[in-house]
Amino acid sequence: MSTKAFIFDLDGVIVDTAKYHYLAWQKIADQLGIEFTHEHNELLKGVSRVRSLDIILALGKTTASQEDKNKWLVQKNEDYLSYLVDMDTSEILPGVLPILKYLKDQNQLIALGSASKNARPILEKTGSLTYFDAIVDGNDVSNAKPDPEVFLIAAQLLGMKPEDSIVFEDSVAGIQAANIGKMTSIGIGEASILHEAKYIFPDFTHVGVNFIEALINT
């Protein structure tokens, strides 16, 4: 059996922390009198914190000083982290653990490639840290998705070529990053949104072992 690099995004792929990001951003938007819906939140998926704030301000046609922006960025992160305090293994999305266990049993290489700067504590709290051979998060990269930097670093840390790397993503920017990086892109979510992915599944309960085995042997 050949060896491949399996690279996972975090938010919306392994855990549903997207809901906590939404709540924290909504709190900021409410303060500023800006309407911020779940549909608007789709624009922030896979996007850095700084860029996310700019998008929200643009939605409200609002300008702000850098000082105010910095204050809101800190507040958003503090609110977000407060939601993470009670996270445990129950927060891992359905179907993810069986796939991680199967990959580990098959001696495949597993990495995290996430924009989140809180990736390690989240993996620790959910008891999934030990599955990962490498972790690349928002602290390790200078370019946000759709730049493929986060995935290219992950593949490099695993000692694998991009063409032997498989990326699981739930955001358009993440899928584009995988494609630009010449990796196999697998979308987890709605086909209408993630149509640029090579393969798409609604969630990990639809990702069968046979499919993973075929990827390994391709």
Image: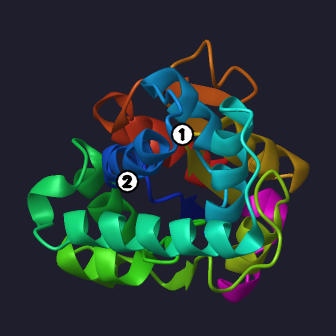
Q: Is residue 205 above or below residue 213?
A: above
Residue 145 locus on image (x, y percent):
76, 56
Determine the residue positioned at 32% across, 44% down: 19
The N terminus sits in image quarter: bottom right
Check residue 170 in the rendering and tell me which mark sits there, or answer none. Answer: 1
Other residues around mark 2 within 10 Å, as few (<14) / some (14–19) / many (≥20): many
In this rendered view, identify the residue nearer to me: 75 or 138.
75
Check residue 61 in the rendering and tell me which mark sits there, or answer none. Answer: none
Residue 111 visible in the snapshot: no
Question: In the displayed structure, does residue 88 sit left or right of residue 104?
Answer: left
The question of residue 84 being in magenta is answered with no
Determine the residue positioned at 22% across, 63% down: 83
How far is disc 1 from disc 2 in space, using C-alphas? 20 Å
User: Which of the 4 image quarters holds residue 206?
Assistant: top left
Secondary element under disc 1, as helix, strand or loop, is loop
Question: In the displayed structure, does residue 56 sit left or right of residue 112?
Answer: right
Q: Is residue 165 above or below residue 134?
A: above
Check residue 24 in the rendering and tell me which mark sits there, or answer none. Answer: 2
In this rendered view, identify the residue nearer to me: 143 or 33.
33
Viewer-side label of 1, 2? 2
Residue 119 locus on image (x, y percent):
43, 75
